[in-house]
Amino acid sequence: MSSMSRRHLMFAATGIAAIAAAPRLVFAQAAAPAPAAAAPTGPFTLPPLAYPTNAFEPHIDAKTMEIHHDRHHAAYVTNMNNVAKTNPQLGTAKIEDVLGNLNALDDSIKFTVRNNLGGHANHTMFWEIMGPNGGKPEGEVLAAIDRDLGGLEKFQNDFNAAGGRQFGSGWVFVTVSKDGKLAIETRPNQDNPMMDGKRALMGNDVWEHAYYLNYQNRRADYLKAWWNTVNWAKIAERYAAAKAGTLGV
Ligand code: MN
């Protein structure tokens, strides 16, 4: 018998031993199910959606919502929990304080925190300001849109145009100052106005993962349709919080 064949037999014998052991493993798992392997653990958590993933059909399809929340946003959370294992201060600080002082971080984690804590903050805001039967802007928010952004129609057109012009991946936001002034601003990647000491009243995600399954390269159509998903009551709450100086993520 060649040495090659002997090695092959040895591997085969090892395989038989593994098969023989397998039924006991299966039995042990059945008696005490293991927790879900991919569940991220740590100080950062994925906020559950307050509506079903099909809530925005046909404007945003359920599959896009599921992948966007359960995979993309979850990945930012998991990555932050991994960084927090060796930098536990990240898990106890306020997100707005960390993002507002990125230069205070060690160079070895600055890039990771910028992208992943930025992504976590952006998406947490994004899910919050969306909702079925979102109504229309009214009261103080509508007055601010009229005063600072030229009225609702001009605001929506300018916001969509800014989102369309954002080259590559990024976001289009409405920032709000402490005295309630509004402005349309874009950021690349997962950057957030908090990185400049500002606050996002609302924002739309123009990464391709936000729309590509349904709209492919038609970002302009997604930007228009997205207005059907906006929860204006929540935006009014955020506007009041901004003026009170309590608006965070
Ligand atoms: Mn996204």
Image (cartoon, grey):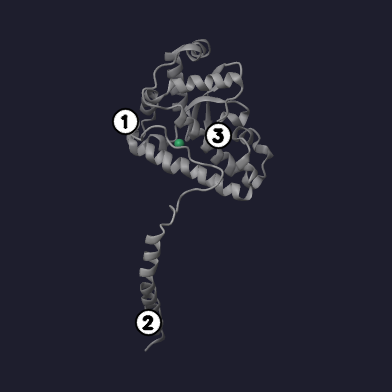
The quadrant of the picture showing ligand 1 is top left
* Residue 42, x across and y down, in percent: 55, 47
User: Looking at numbered disc 3 in the image, what kind of residue is underneath it?
Assistant: Asp
User: Looking at numbered disc 2 in the image, what kind of residue is underneath it?
Assistant: Leu
Q: How far, Cα to Cα, is label 3 from label 2?
A: 57 Å
User: Looking at numbered disc 1 in the image, what kind of residue is underneath it?
Assistant: Glu
User: Residue at coordinates 56% horizontally, 49% vertically from top-left?
Assistant: 82
* Residue 104, x across and y down, in percent: 69, 39
Q: Which residue is mark 1?
A: 57
Give the class, few, some or many, for how many residues have Cα within 10 Å of label 1's Cα (few <14, many ≥20): few
* Residue 240, x across and y down, in percent: 54, 19
Q: Which residue is mark 2?
A: 9
Please report whichever mark, 1 or 3, sits nearer to the chain's N-terminal start: 1
Q: Which residue is mark 3?
A: 191
Give the class, few, some or many, for how many residues have Cα within 10 Å of label 2's Cα (few <14, many ≥20): few
User: Residue at coordinates 36% horizontally, 74% vertically from top-left?
Assistant: 20
User: Mark 3 or 2, which is nearer the eye?
Assistant: 2
Q: Is residue 205 visible?
A: no
- Secondary structure under tag 2 reads helix
- Secondary structure under tag 3 reads loop
User: Relative to 12, is 80 on the left or the right?
Assistant: right
Q: Is residue 162 visible?
A: yes
Q: How far, Cα to Cα, is label 2 from label 1?
A: 58 Å
Please report whichever mark, 2 or 1, sits nearer to the chain's N-terminal start: 2
Q: Quadrant of residue 176?
A: top right
Nearer to us in this view, 163 or 242: 242
